[in-house]
Amino acid sequence: MVKLIFIILAGIGVIAALMVVSLKNVVHSAFCLIITLFCVGCIFVLLHAEFLAATQILIYVGAIMVLVIFALMLIDSRETANDRRFHHQSQWVIIVGVILALEIVIFIIPKSKFIVNPEKMIAQTAEAGGNTQLLARYLFTDYLFAFEFASLIILVAVVAAVFLGKRLSPTGKRE
Amino acid sequence: MQYNFVVLLGDIKQISAEMVIILTIVVIMLMDILAPRGDKTLLAYISLGGTLLAALVCCTWNGVEQSIFSGALVVDRFAFFFKLMLFTITALTQLMSINYVKLRNINRGEFHALVLFATLGMLIMVSGADLLSIYLGLELNAIACCVLVAFLRQNVKSNEAALKYFVLSLFSSGILLYGISLVYGVTGEINIYKIARYLSGQQNVSHPMLHLGLVLLVVGFGFKVAYVPFHMWVPDVYEGAPISVAAFLSLGPKAAGFAVLVRIVMVAVFTLKVEWSILFSLLAVVTMTLGNLTALCQENIRRLLAYSGIAHVGYMLMGLVAAANYPQLGITSVIFYLLCYVFFNIGPFGIIILLCNKHKICEFIGDFDGLSVRSPLSAFVMTIFLLSLAGIPPMVGFVAKFLIFMAAMKAELYWLVAIGIINSAIAMFYYLRIVVAMYVRAPKPGLKINASPSLTIALAIMVGFTLLMGIYPALFIGFARYSIATLL
């Protein structure tokens, strides 16, 4: 049952992701991206990662996609609609990509076994007082460095955005 | 282990060099805001001072090797070696930038802060002991470098280069993350040392999913290190970026990427050495050959240096292949190559900065015509760098190449050595082409050198080390050997 739901969700997610890159209208692409992110959130629920699922929906679908759509409102989407969408070599890319993907599905996946065992992990998580609590504890102990270091990445992103977004001085015309 | 405040303080003490960099960034950004109209040259000196102070602090490391932050980072000799190298690269970049940013009208606080941000990311990459912190360091570096490339905002080429760099680094991050997740799925660990321990306990490590994960990791880091076929961004970025940033990019991310690659293949998946040595030998062949052949027909020196840099990565990969059978010899040759590469590869970029003025950048080979008449000294210095890049005996480039070829010979990779030697001969042609232009052709009018004290100091350091390491390489080879003793 869980497997079936997973396949449905993953299938919708992948198809929506393909549509994000292949649709001509950027607004439609943005909406497909919402579907993809939502499916990923649902998969997190299947994996008993409720906290991650909630953040996925709140942050990606809620906050980031709203920003993306705001940004799209500032550009004229009709302008891009008539452009040639793909590079002339894209058919070769598709052929090679499909072959590689089939290779992974046929040769690699059947022979592989992930040692990360979800059932055992779910049991351990429940024992430790639930997902959210465990996440909080790890974030401030084992993964403290990564957690703090991520703030530096956000800082550099802010500096970058402010610098690149600032209007050029009147003398600094484009060459 | 119980994680408490005392342990945390001890861990922070171990990364005090990085803390110095962070504090310098904060000081620079605050001073930038507090003095909005003033001259920003002071900030350049502060950032240089911060780098030197961090290097000093790094040198006070007492030799104790330990993993810190619950295994997120590791403090060891290998990381120490690369940290010193990164501080050198950063300091040279900053010295070369001081005058150049004024010339191109990009003397802003953000520039100096972003160089330090990029350095910080690389420092974390080289000391990262788990794939998560390596990824975070890589991402910090990529964002900072991307903005540095875009710094000439009025320039179309700079914008184009930045966009290419941005898209490709996002793409490579995605591939890298996929690889990390597959490795995690198979081994259940993200810590490099724990992955090694898990794999050495397994009977049959030849796991197809692990191979796929490893290939994806190699691809992901390939964009940083720039081997073929992940090199497409390099020439455009070197051409479009501010010159000192191009110099920084030609060394920094490459060195950090190599450090991470060495740590992953030599520690985490050393048990798969048969598989990855085949992979790297193929990559080495195409990287050397394509880099050199494409460099032959370049007229723009920055593009030429980009392709020659790609070819040099090919030689280094050869050392990595040799390391599968002779770890000590192979890795020593690779990191010694990287160390001396710092000096003679940043050098030519310094000469290009020396020749550029407000209106014109002399970046074509034709612009170097008759430089020996206009400025004998700078032509001589450029010749030293080029001869070293070509690998001609008294220079250090020869020693470095010799070590790599020797390691490959010992590992009985004769075909790889043969291809490497043919490639070195091809490379000789395009380096000597510039030398011929400088010494044989008639000088062009209007070629003027624009020396500043800081740039002169940087060039003097680079020439000095190129010669010193060429004459007395044993000292530096010894340092390289010392630094990998506990890694393998």
Image: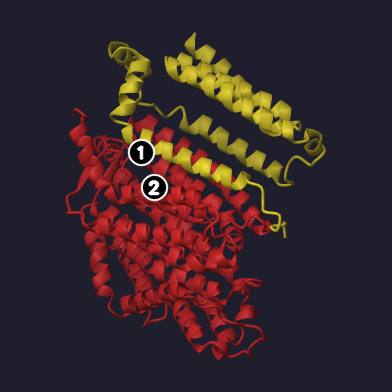
Residue wearing tag 2? B275
Residue wearing tag 1? B206
Please say if the residues under marks 1 and 2 sit with CB atoms less than 8 Å apart.
yes
In this view, which residue lies farthest toward the top? Answer: A1
| Residue B296, quarter of picture | bottom right
Name above or below for residue B443 compared with residue B85: below
- Amino acid type at circle 2 is Glu
What letter labels the chain drawn in yellow?
A
Q: Residue at x 77, y 34 (%)?
A: A77
Q: Residues within 10 Å of mark 2 (few under 14, many from 20)?
A: some
| Residue B480 located left or right of residue B413 | left
Chain to which the residue tagged by mark 2 belongs: B
Q: Is B440 in front, or is B401?
A: B440
Task: Say whether disc 1 or disc 2 marks the residue closer to the N-terminus.
Answer: 1
Image coordinates of residue A37 in percent, x first then y, are 57, 23
Chain to which the residue tagged by mark 1 belongs: B
Q: Is B367 in front, or is A35?
A: B367
- Amino acid type at circle 1 is Ser
Name above or below for residue B228 compared with residue B363: above
